[in-house]
Amino acid sequence: MTARLLWAVAAAVAASVPLVTANTYYLYLGMTVGIMVVITSGFNVLAGLSGQVSLGHAGLYAIGAYAAAILATRWHLALAAALPLSIALTAAIGALLALAALRVSGPYLAMVTIAFGIIVEHALIEWVGLTGGPGGIFNIPKPTLAGVALPLPRYYFVVAAAAALALWMTHNLMSSAWGRAFIAVKGSEIAAESLGLGTYGLRTAAFTISAAFAGAGGCLFSFLNGYVSPDSFTLQTSILFLLIVLFGGLGILAGPLVGALVLVLLPELLREFLDYRLIFYGGLLLGSIYFLPRGAVGAVQDLWRHPPRAAAAPSAGVPSAWAPAGAPAGFASRPAPGPGRPLLVVEDLWVAFGGIQAVADVDLTVAAGTVHSLIGPNGAGKTTLVNLVTGFSRPDRGRITFDGVSIIGLAPAVIARRGLARTFQTPQLFEELTVLENVMVGVAGHRLGSLAAALTGRGRAEAAALHREATALLQTAGLGDWADVPAGALPFGLRRRLEIGRALGAGATMLLLDEPAAGLVPTEIAELDALLGRLREAGLTILLIEHHIELVMAVSDRVTVLDEGRVIAEGRPEVVQRDPAVVEAYLGSA
C-alpha cells in the first residue's frame, strides 16, 4: 500500500509540472528526465535483472534518434509512425549485436559494447549522405498526434506517458516467469541450465528489450530537440545510463526514476562546474558502489523494513519436516519406460583433465523407477560422471543414452528438457529470489510463455497455477514457512532442501542428487530417506551420489562404486557392502 501511494504521488507531481509552469526550460528538463527513465528502464532489465553491463547503449540510443529524424524529415512520418519503426529497427540491431557480443561476459562484454558505441559515433560523423555528418540533422518537424500539433506542454504528457509505460512494462516483466529467469541466469548460470533455461537466449532477449527501450527514447529525443548530432551520443552518454541505474538501484523498479531525477537535475544546478562533469560522474559512481551497493532506493528500502527481509524467517528457526506420506505434493514426473527397463545407459566413458584420468572405462545402467547410488572415496570421479551425463563436461570418448536417445554433445539445458534434473555438490541457489520464486523457476523451466505477454502483464491465470504448484512443492520440502525468505538467507541444510524441491519442480523423469544429505542432521536424513522412497513410488528414477552409507544402503536398489575413475563394484547394496574391493578402497574394515 505504501509503495502504491508513493507511485501515485510521483505520478501526480509529474502530471502537475505543465500546470504550474510554462517555462520551456523546466519542461525540457522534465522531458529529459522522462526520456532517461524510458532508456534506463530497459537498461535496468539488462544490467539489473540479467546482470549484463553494456557501455555501448548510446549507440542504440543514437540509432533510434537518427531513425526517427530521417523518417520525419525525408519520409514525412509523424511521431505515431516513426516511434514503432525506430523501436523495431533498434531492437533488431540490438539483437544482432547481442548474438555476437554475449558470447563473452563481464569486462569483455563491456569492451565489445564500447567498440560498438564508438563505431556508431564515427558512422554518424562519416556517413554524411545519411546522417548529415558532424552537423547532424536539423529541422525535424514538431511532433503531432492524430494530426494535432503537440506544443511543448502537450508533448510533455506524451513523454511522461512513455516513461510511465516503460516503468509499467518493467514491473510486469519483473514479476513474470521471464523476469525470474533473467535473475536466475544472473545468479547461477549452471543451475539455470540444469532446469532447462537457455542462458544465451535469455541474455539475448534481455539485451533486445533494452535496445528497444533505447530506440524509443531516441525517437522521443529527436522530436523534442528538433535536431540530432553525434555530440549527443558519446561514451559519456553510455556511462550516464549506467550511473543512473547504479545510483537508483540495480534491479529495482524505481531505480531509473530516482537516478534520472538526480543525474539530470543535479548537473543543471551545478552548471558553473560543467567542465568537471566527468569527475562528478566518476565520484558519484564510486560513492554509489561503496556506500550504496543497492542504490539510493535500495538503501531506503533496507531502512524502511523492520525487520529486514533477510531476517524475516520463521521465528522458531526450525524447519518443518518433509511431507510425511503419499506422493509428493505438486510433483508429477514425465512418462518413463516401464519399471526395470534401462533409462540411463553409460558405456565405455572416458575423460581426462590435464593428463589426469578422471573417468576411465565406465559402464553404468540405471533402470527406470529405481534408486541407483554412486559411491566412492573423494576424487573417485562421481561428480565428474554426473557432469558428463548432464552435459556440463564433454567426454573424450564413450556413449551416453537417455531413454534410448544419445545425449552426447547436447547442451545442459537441452538435456534437462529431455527429463534429466540435478542438484549440485555445493548448492546453487538464485539468492536474489525468494524460496518460493526459486521453486517457481524450476516449475516453469524453459516454458516462459510469450515475452510480449510478460511485458503487458497478461497470463495471470498461468502465473497463479505456477504459484500453486510451487507452493505445494515447498510444503513437500518442508519449507512452506520460508516461502517469502530470500534464498540467500537460508541456512545450509535448508539450501539442500530447496535445491531438491526446485529440481522436483522441473517435472523430470530422472533426478541426479549430488550429496543431498551433506549438512543434514540425523532426523533430516531419515526424512530424506522417506522422501526418496516416495519419489520412487511416484515413478521417478534417482541417481544418488552420497557418502552417508547408512542412507545409501537403506534406500538404494543398486549401487555402483567408483575408485580412481573406474568402476570397482556394482550390484545389490548388501552384495556391494561385502565386496572386498569396496571394503579396501572405501568402506574399510571394522
Image (cartoon, rainbow, N blue to C red):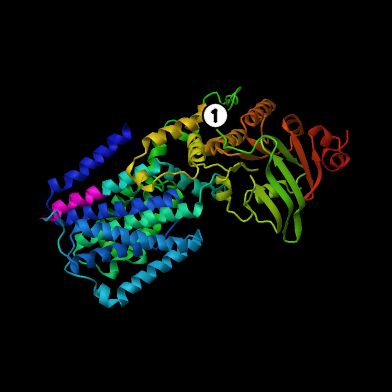
Please say if 100 is above or below 193.
Answer: below
Q: Which residues are magenta?
A: 148-162
- Indicate whether residue 161 is drawn in magenta: yes
Q: Quadrant of the C terminus?
A: top right
Mark 1 lies on residue: 479
The rendered magenta stretch, by its main secondary structure, is classed as helix
- Indicate whether residue 182 is drawn in magenta: no
Mark 1 neighbour class, 10 Å CA radius: few under 14, some 14 to 19, many 20 or more: many
Q: Residue at x 42, y 38 (%)?
A: 302
Q: Is residue 515 visible?
A: no
Q: Is residue 467 left or right of residue 214?
A: right
Task: State the image coordinates of residue 497 (x, y, percent, origin top left).
Answer: 59, 33
Q: Residue at x 62, y 56 (%)?
A: 409
Q: Is residue 357 visible?
A: yes
Please say if 274 is above or below 347.
Answer: below
> How many numbered marks are there?
1
Q: Quadrant of the N terminus?
A: top left
Say which of 298 and 557 sits in front.
Answer: 557
Under tag 1, what secondary structure? loop
Task: State the image coordinates of residue 161 (x, y, percent, origin top left).
Answer: 23, 48
- The amino acid on which the numbered mark 1 sits, given as a three-letter code, is Leu
